[in-house]
Amino acid sequence: MTKSKETTCFAYDEGKCKILSIAKCEGESCRFLKTKKEVQESEKRALERIKSLDKEDQKNILNLYYPKNKKILKKI
Ligand code: SF4
């Protein structure tokens, strides 16, 4: 049996969505549907962009969006 596309979504959990306040997954018509790999690639691009900024801007963004993981830029 092949998986439906929405079951490969990073936010899919037994028919429910972990990120949207909805009762049931919207399936393939959902515009937020992304695989875990797509999420990882998107985060990597975002981190590379942050890393390209000057140190002060990097620090401000990390404080705002990654307050518990300020060493995240060292992963890429
Ligand atoms: S509603 Fe959208 S984001 Fe949520 S699990 Fe389904 S496809 Fe993914």
Image (cartoon, grey):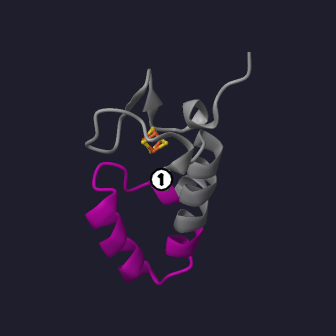
Indicate whether 35 appears above or below 53.
above
Tell me the kind of residue under disc 1. Phe
- 76 displayed left or right of 60: right
Which residue carries the number 1 mark? 32
User: Residue, x 47% and y 84% (percent of image)?
Assistant: 54
Quarter holding residue 36: top right
Q: Quadrant of residue 60?
A: bottom left
Q: Measuring from the top left, give residue 42's x and y in whole percent.
A: 58, 59
Dominant SS type (magenta): helix
Q: Is residue 37 left or right of residue 67?
A: right
Judged from the image, the secondary structure of the residue bearing numbered disc 1 is loop
Horizontal side of residue 29 vs 41, given as left or right: left
Per the image, is 71 magenta? yes
Magenta segment, which residues? 48-73
Counting from the top left corner in percent of width and height, residue 11 is at: 45, 37
Name the spot of residue 70 as percent of width and height, x first: 37, 56
Q: Nearer the viewer, residue 38 or 26?
A: 26
Residue at the spot x=36%, y=33% of the render?
A: 24
Does residue 21 lie above or below 56 as drawn?
above
- Residue 68 location, x and y as percent? 30, 49
Q: Residue at x 44, y 54 (%)?
A: 71
Asked if 11 appears above or below 42 in the picture, the reply is: above
Along the line of sight, the residue nearer the viewer: 65 or 24: 24
